[in-house]
Image (cartoon, grey):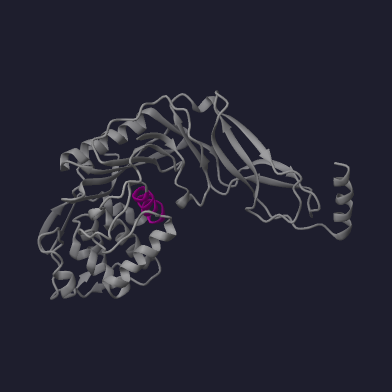
Amino acid sequence: MKKLISAPLAAFFAAFLSVAAAAQSVPAPTIAAKSWLLLDANSGQVLASENPNMRIEPASLTKIMTAYLSFEAIKDKKLDLNQMVNVSVHAWKVDPGSSKMFIDPATPVKVNDLLYGLMVQSGNDAAVALAEAVAGSEDTFVALMNREAERMGLKATHFSNPHGLPSPDNYSTAQDLSILALHEISDYPEFYKIDSVKEFTYNKITQSNRNRLLWLDPTVDGLKTGHTEAAGYCMIASAKRPNGKSGDRRLIAVVLGTASDQARSQESQKLLNWGFQNFDTIKLYARGQALATQEVWKGSQGQVKIGFDRDIYVTVAKGVGDKLKPVLTRKDPLVAPIAQGSRVGTLALMQPDGKALTELPVLALEQVNQATIFGRAWDSMRLWFK
């Protein structure tokens, strides 16, 4: 069943937004895939999906998590891009009929080359080599993959290897994979650029990136393709295009289980174009911008600034943005002490039909300590008559 504008993916926005099912007049596209989803990366809203929670075999899309943990290890200085890694026989012998980078136990390889071999060439041997470099063994690395999946809120995902070769214990969903993809883009933008490289040469062998949209659409800059007989042809593609005064806008298309390499590219392109053509993403408020000031009782100061701890975006059908009406509901009375970042109200964006499109938690932008004992006593008396 197709859905339009579902709740945003709270796992990676820390329950930041709560988006109700919105009355949208834009019909969902017809996508020739078993499961698919289109995510607006700015607002965190799912614009459309079909079977987003269907369990699928992620194939080489698994490598996004392998890359993510490798990036994390580099950030934490457990690995270095120029570090030479010894290639184990275990990595070298990974399924000889599958995609490989062609590393060799006789030749140490740079971590940087392994990352390109993983994401550009989709090398299964590179995946194992990185897993062993990060965690000491493939099994230990897989445990880290599942721990990270749990932290991200990937509730329907389990990994059994770092490369995505067929295994009954390696599974995910379109929704979970969209969250994983956004984490890579948002958390490691300096490494995400690897995904846009069209070809890479290692061991005198040049291999092309299997993401054909990198050649067809200059706004596409990632992420990854995958294929096994059971999974079909899969792709997670992301594109960034200008979005007027709100800056660039990014969409992430997850298309799983198509019939061919050509089909996954065509369907992903269709989905991205549909999202950009039919929806606007509006920046409502900036991080730290004072939405209003609110009276404080029993506090060391009489008012507190309220707003949001991050930029606020909302995605709506084209032409709807200027018809939304913000309605602020405040916690009253607001009694000190108040911690910075604590919730003090809700901002609802109301549609012309009176239904709430989005409800946003409003936070205290500053800390307010308690007043002196005399100040508290005075406000207690005032509250009695309020």
Q: Main secondary structure of the magenta part?
A: helix
Q: Residue at x 25, y 53 (%)?
A: 57
- Vertical position of residue 169 compared to residue 51: above or below: below
Image quarter (top left, top right, bottom left or bottom right) of the C terminus: top right
Q: Is residue 36 left or right of residue 9?
A: left
Say if residue 43 shows up in the picture.
yes
Q: Nearer the viewer, residue 210 or 19?
A: 19
Identify whether 119 is placed above or below 386.
below
Query: Percent from the top left, x then y, of residue 303?
Result: 75, 46
Tell me if residue 80 can be seen. no
Q: Quadrant of the N terminus?
A: top left
Residue at 46% over, 52% down? 11
- Residue 379 location, x and y as percent? 86, 50
State the image coordinates of residue 232 (x, y, percent, origin top left): 19, 46
Q: Quadrant of residue 29?
A: top left
| Magenta residues (range) | 176-188
Q: Is residue 109 left or right of residue 303?
A: left
Q: Residue at x 34, y 60 (%)?
A: 68
Q: Is residue 254 left or right of residue 122?
A: right
The front one of 276 and 110 is: 276
Residue 37 is one of the magenta-drawn residues: no
Q: Position of residue 154 (x, y in %)?
A: 39, 54
Camera-side residue of 276 and 107: 276
Among the 4 quarters of the image, the one containing residue 292: top right
For the point 13% across and 59% down, which residue is it? 98
